Amino acid sequence: MGTTCRCIAVAVFLVGALLLGSMVGAQQRGVLVRPDPIPDFLARKKTAHETSIRALGSRGIVGYLPEVRRMVAAARLPPTGGDHAQRPQIELTFREDIAVGLTTMGFTATKIRRSQARGRDPIQAMARVTRGGASSEELLLLSDTVVIARTHLGKRSAMLGDGLYSSTDFKVIAVWKGSPKVGESIVIRQWSGRRPDGTTTSISGDLHAAPGTTYLLPLSRNLYEQRVAEHSRKARPVRSGYLLYGDAHEILVRNGRQVARVRGKPEDLDALRAQAHAD
């Protein structure tokens, strides 16, 4: 028994030495040996999905997810690319991102079909959101609330029990989609601002709107409630709170008509309004 153990130990040592030697040799040849990042990526995605699904359950809408998953599974989507051995798992993770994202944003299978019948596909839009590069029109489609509003109070630090740290207040001028009423005050909540420990967080891309400026705002109450639910069971959403979904588009007057400045270019409001409606 002792001889056998010694033989096994010698064999393990030799294998380890060979592996170490190959790594050292690769480093000496200038080849950087890095661990495969894909398993860690998939594990983090799995944890994120589990957190999101628990939040969907606390919001009472997780029952819509299975049918949305089936629709996403049947959809023709661009391949994820690459020839990695774990590409099938990456593809499944990508589709779960889309299904969870659509359910989070308040889309049911019925609402998706209705939108597709009008020539606008939330599944494809969410796929581009997930990968990056979604158009302003796609973000308007996925938003549950779209309003024209004027900044009432500029950005300020405000901890309101929802886990976010700052607010910008707006007065609604016109409603394209959603439940706000004209003349109502709404609040865009953001993570940047003063934290409970006194430190200040600054996030690139957060809205810094000057008082009196008019914007076309793609918003999501659904995403706001989801992020609050994911943050803590004790957190509660602000009644008039929303998250900005995409960019705030400043309203300008060009040749006597109002246009929205979308990514630096003036866009016709009527054309954008038509894109905002999912059903």
Image: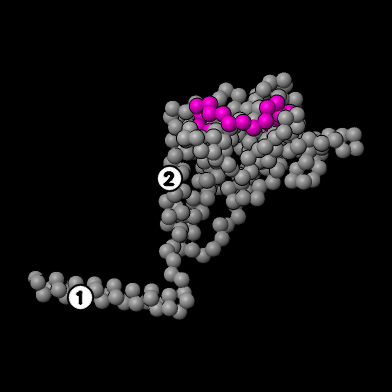
Residue 249 position within the rendered picture, expressed as x and y whole percent measured from the top left: 73, 38
Residue 113 position within the rendered picture, expressed as x and y whole percent measured from the top left: 62, 37
How many residues crowd around disc 1 within 10 Å: few (fewer than 14), some, or many (20 or more)? Answer: few
Q: Secondary structure at mark 1?
A: helix
How many residues crowd around disc 2 within 10 Å: few (fewer than 14), some, or many (20 or more)? Answer: few
Dividing the picture into quarters, in which one does residue 118 lie? top right
Residue 61 position within the rendered picture, expressed as x and y whole percent measured from the top left: 50, 31
Q: Is residue 66 magenta?
A: no
Marks 2 and 1, the one that precedes in the sequence = 1
Near-viewer residue (258 or 158): 158
Residue on which disc 2 sits: 47
Q: What segment is highlighted magenta in the picture?
A: 144-164
The N terminus - image quarter: bottom left
For the stretch drawn in magenta, the main secondary structure is strand
Q: Is residue 9 above or below residue 44?
A: below
Q: Is residue 250 left or right of residue 134?
A: right
Residue on which disc 1 sits: 10
Near-viewer residue (253 or 8): 253
Q: Amino acid at mark 1?
A: Val
